[in-house]
Image (cartoon, rainbow, N blue to C red):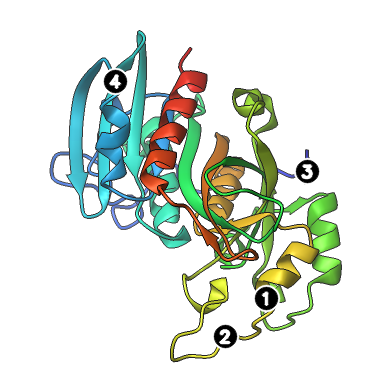
Amino acid sequence: MGDFQFKKVKTMLNKLAASELVLNEDGSVYHLNLLPEDIAEKIILVGDPDRVPKVSKYFDKIEIKKNKREFYTHTGTLRGERITVMSSGIGTENIDIVMNELDALVNIDLKKKEFKSEHQSLQLFRLGTCGSVNPDVEVDNMLVTQNVVGLDGLLHFYSDYQFENEFSKNFLEKFPYQNIKPMLYFSDWAEDIADYYKDAKYHGNTATFPGFYAPQGRQLRLKALDDQFLETLNDLGVTNFEMETSAIYGLAKLLGHKALTVNCVIANRRRGEFSADHHTSEKNMIEWVLDRIIK
């Protein structure tokens, strides 16, 4: 596990200004439209709002259904345990909203707008889809992210974030794109809950991109920086790529939560393959995850 330094944020004022913690008229957090009692300790994060009912249909009971913008939340029980599934939308900028507002629900007194004296840690499980840059990774299989590199720059806006391990040191040393290099940051999984997914076929290193086209090596009318970009990432130890995990892992460490990502590999870009039935693969991933995180 990487060397992560966690520094407690000090503030002269314990009470948050209305402009810092924005709430709706009913006292719910602004974007997620949720109250503290609306979420469970275990939360499944999906990108697509349409994937939320695909997960919650397996619940024995659904007690909460709320939404605002692209953020849809269902909370219920499965095999006697409370669980939440929530959509984040696409990209690390949305994850910045989701992670901070989820943390506010459990670690800030929303009525007093004050930090709670006792910290509560959430368990966050991202279920997504990804492309692989490793030619040996077969489509329609699940890949768990151990290490992640973010190419979007988000964590550089947070003053207390420092992370380094062998993957990050090797990646930084050999990464050839100097104009992108200042944006890079790294994180890794919550090792103490990684056993949930110990039997996944693949464990790997993920790159989180700030876009779908040129950042992922696609070219329509605009030319990408380098048409060998994905091959270069694979040479640096990257297994797959997507658009959310670096922010989830990094912010989870800063805020004191535990996070794991599993993605269904629906494309292998090096081999030019795409899943013949990614809907079935998605269904298998949902069932696989629920069977492991709720015994």
Cα separation, mark 4 vs mark 2, equals: 43 Å
Q: Amino acid at mark 4?
A: Phe
In the rendered view, tell whether residue 256 sits above or below residue 278.
above
Residue on which the image places disc 1: 229
Q: Earlier in the sequence, mark 2 or mark 3?
A: 3
Relative to the observer, which residue lies in front, 210 or 111?
A: 210
Circle number at residue 2: 3
Q: Residue at x 48, y 76 (%)?
A: 213
Q: Secondary structure at mark 3?
A: loop
Circle number at residue 59: 4
Residue 107 lies left or right of residue 145; in this view the side is left
Is residue 236 at least partly visible in the picture? yes
Q: Residue at x 21, y 22 (%)?
A: 62
Q: Residue at x 30, y 16 (%)?
A: 77
For this orientation, the residue located farthest to the top is 80
Nearer mark to the viewer, of 4 and 3: 4
